[in-house]
DNA sequence: AGCTTATTGTCGCAAATTGCGACAATAATA
DNA sequence: TATTATTGTCGCAATTTGCGACAATAAGCT
């Protein structure tokens, strides 16, 4: 007996920021060469959002992740049973017990923003790799996962200014210039430095701390964190 | 044998504008007193978006409707099999053949914007009413449908300025003051008249036509339509 | 035909926001 | 002490927005 809802899956686009680049978590399935977004299924008695958080916890070890649902993909064309069959066979899973996984799925997609440094990605039972890939160096992804990534990035860009979501990609204390680099990678364009600083600070939700001495030969920037309230 | 995907439904919040008020389409199920959003299920070989358009066509008679997916509701708490059972029994549908309808559903929600005048709402086989209700005079809706409406309105407000989506609620030719009333009902606030006119016209996507003589004792406004290109 | 009323199209101006360069203030190095 | 790279701010022009003023109607009323 199956313990998950049939025909429903979720996929997560997990963003992190490192080396001045935006990266996402990608899985690689055993013995298949197939790359995919981390995803999963919804338990019979489990809230959809909880299922996604459970999946993220398994992949990253983190609770309390910034998470947004952005689109549900439901085209027939994304139904390719031979792909799932390949994955199951490569893992020695009997098809007879997993026929529900060969049926058509609709996938609810979420994006997550996390602090890159806090994560040690963990593969699941079917995969031998879960790792960061820069957005401009992604391997070919299976099914429509490249489309999902594209739409995630677009939605993230549109939501950037609602509060200060971009800062979820940085450590708890961060500098304004670092935040600007996050914005620039998401939007794919350079922003004016002084205008950016003025705009961010005018939101009035950042608290200034000590300076950060990088060891480089120039003025040290201040560190900021979210203001508690 | 069931011809729809199990565990997946869709609901539509169909907006129209009439009498200076925002309205939505609401169904009433036979012999139950239950009010609900128009919705349906996805055929085994049917794209999700196409299923929603099919449902809208059945309810409104219209093709080519402005449609946006805005959220997928997947909490366990929205699973109330007794509600669906009540509806089926009130229609004399044998439960034995419809057990899939008593299982838990995840619902993908869409909002549609249509020209009120072009629609003659049609009930479906299970309902005896499909009619317009002003947003501030809605009957109590079943399950979480009031939450769905609330989120639809919120999303619509956030997307109002992307192009000129609000104009989809008006006839092909409309006046700027009429458009302003649409915006005001969606946003729930008064807008400055001259600033609104200037902003809308500055988008440069409206074409001016003849004046509209209302028979009232004052200057007649110009009619506009979307510029073709 | 004038006078009145309600509403529309525009304009002007002040206030707020944004783009962009200038400049002084560092932190480390030579 | 001079040099270099980067940061925090300021000033100013350009753009956008909020808001009132005013002329231009369409029709009703004497």
Image (cartoon, coloured by chain):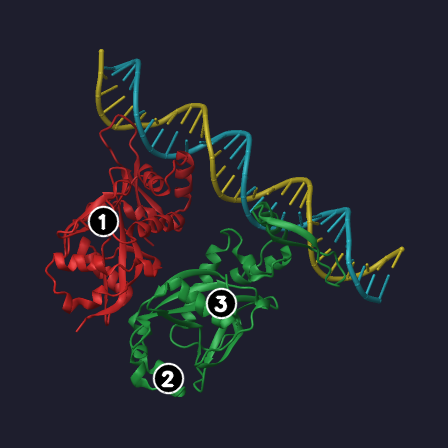
Chain colours: A green, B red, C cyan, D yellow
- Disc 2 residue crowd, few under 14, some 14–19, many 20+, Cα 10 Å: many
**Relative horizontal placement of residue C19, taking residue B112 as reference (left or right):** right
- Give the Cα distance between marks 1 and 3: 38 Å
**Relative horizontal placement of residue B33, taking residue A202 as reference (left or right):** left
Mark drawn on residue A88: 2
Label 1 with label 3: CB-CB less than 8 Å: no
- Give the Cα distance between marks 2 and 3: 24 Å
Are both tags, 2 and 3, on one chain?
yes
Label 1 residue SS:
strand
Q: Quadrant of the N terminus of chain A?
A: bottom left
The reply to whether residue B119 is in sight is yes
Label 3 sits on residue? A14
Label 3 residue SS:
strand
Label 2 residue SS:
helix
Residue B213 position in % (x across, y down): 24, 33
**Relative horizontal placement of residue B175, taking residue B89 as reference (left or right):** right
Residue nearest the viewer, comparing A179 with C3: A179
Of marks 2 and 3, which one's residue comes earlier in the chain? Answer: 3
The reply to whether residue B125 is in sight is no
Residue A61 position in % (x across, y down): 52, 69
- Chain letter for mark 2: A
Mark drawn on residue B25: 1
Label 2 with label 3: CB-CB less than 8 Å: no
Q: Is residue A34 above or below residue B116?
A: below
- Give the Cα distance between marks 2 and 1: 45 Å
């Amino acid at each position: 007996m199956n313990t998950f809802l049939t025909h429903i899956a979720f996929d997560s686009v997990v963003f992190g920021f490192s080396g001045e680049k935006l990266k996402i978590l990608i899985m690689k399935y055993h013995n298949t060469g197939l790359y995919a977004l981390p995803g999963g299924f919804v338990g019979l008695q489990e809230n959809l959002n909880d299922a996604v958080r459970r999946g993220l916890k398994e992949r990253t070890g983190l609770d309390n992740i910034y998470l947004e649902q952005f689109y549900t993909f439901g085209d027939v064309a994304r139904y390719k049973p031979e792909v799932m069959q390949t994955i199951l066979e490569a893992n020695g899973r009997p098809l007879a017990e997993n026929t529900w996984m060969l049926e058509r799925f609709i996938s609810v997609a979420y994006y997550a923003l996390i602090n890159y440094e806090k994560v040690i990605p963990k593969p699941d039972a079917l995969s031998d790799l879960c790792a960061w890939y820069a957005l401009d160096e992604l391997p070919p992804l299976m099914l429509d996962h490249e489309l999902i990534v594209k739409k995630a990035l677009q939605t993230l860009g549109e939501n950037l200014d609602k509060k200060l979501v971009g800062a979820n990609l940085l450590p708890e204390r961060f500098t304004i210039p670092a935040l600007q680099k996050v914005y620039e990678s998401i939007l794919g364009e350079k922003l004016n430095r002084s205008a950016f600083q003025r705009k961010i600070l005018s939101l009035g939700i950042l608290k200034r701390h000590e300076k950060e001495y990088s060891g480089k030969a120039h003025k040290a920037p201040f560190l900021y964190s979210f203001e508690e309230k």
